[in-house]
Amino acid sequence: MDGNPHAQAHQSRSRRDVLAGLIFLVIAIAFAWEATHYDMGRTIRMGPGFIPLTLAVLLGVFGAAVAVTGFRNKHDTAEAGPVSWRGIVLVCVSLVIFGAYGRQLGIVPVVFLCVFIVALASVKNTILSALAIAAALSALCWLVFKLGLGMSLPTIGPAFGPFQVF
């Protein structure tokens, strides 16, 4: 390798893109394999394996695109920036909250809380914009998952006691 810092940055970025794409592909294959063990159902009445398989295929396509882009890039350069620990921690906290308290809080409050936390991971978002994003995604999730798909997760969970309206 020559001493050119631009060539080193490019090679580092290309390797990262190829590696990330391959990781996405491996995860997609694992999820697709597992999804085939469940009933697929029909388009009108999807089984429990339909959505995971669809998402696995999409992740596989995305992974392949990222890997191919990493192979093709010859002149792009990127410099490594600082790791966004704030973002990593807030996203992980949000996932734990969703998994641990989803049933107790219900879909609308848990989505609102988790999206609000994740929106604060970006230093570009204000508290007001994070609240607006959380409200919009909570409403969208309620429309899609409760009204559209009839999901069994309560809209407002038992943690809210007498405030359960749905």
Image: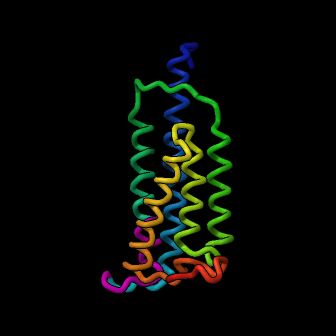
Q: Residue at x 49, y 40 (%)?
A: 17
Give yes or no for residue 100 being in the magenta stretch.
no
Query: Which of these two is toward me, 35 or 95?
Result: 95
Residue positioned most to the front? 162
Above or below, comparing residue 164 to residue 124 in the picture: below
Above or below, comparing residue 162 to residue 143 in the picture: below
Please state the extent of the stretch shown in magenta in the rendering: 43-55
Above or below, comparing residue 63 to residue 149 in the picture: above
> On the rendered structure, is 161 left or right of 145?
right
Quadrant of residue 93 in the image?
bottom right
Looking at the image, what colour scheme do you see?
A: rainbow
Residue positioned most to the left? 44
Give how far across and how far down residue 154 sits, in percent. 54, 81
> On the rendered structure, is 138 left or right of 45?
right
Q: Residue at x 56, y 55 (%)?
A: 116
Above or below, comparing residue 31 to residue 38 in the picture: above
Q: Residue at x 65, y 82 (%)?
A: 161
Query: Which of these two is toward me, 12 or 116?
Result: 116
> On the rendered structure, is 88 left or right of 149?
right
Give how far across and how far down residue 60 sits, in percent. 43, 58
Give how far across and how far down residue 152 sits, in percent. 51, 84
Q: Which quadrant is home to the N terminus? A: top right
Q: Residue at x 58, y 67 (%)?
A: 110
Give how far across and how far down residue 54 sits, in percent. 40, 69
Query: Which of these two is toward me, 96 or 28?
Result: 96
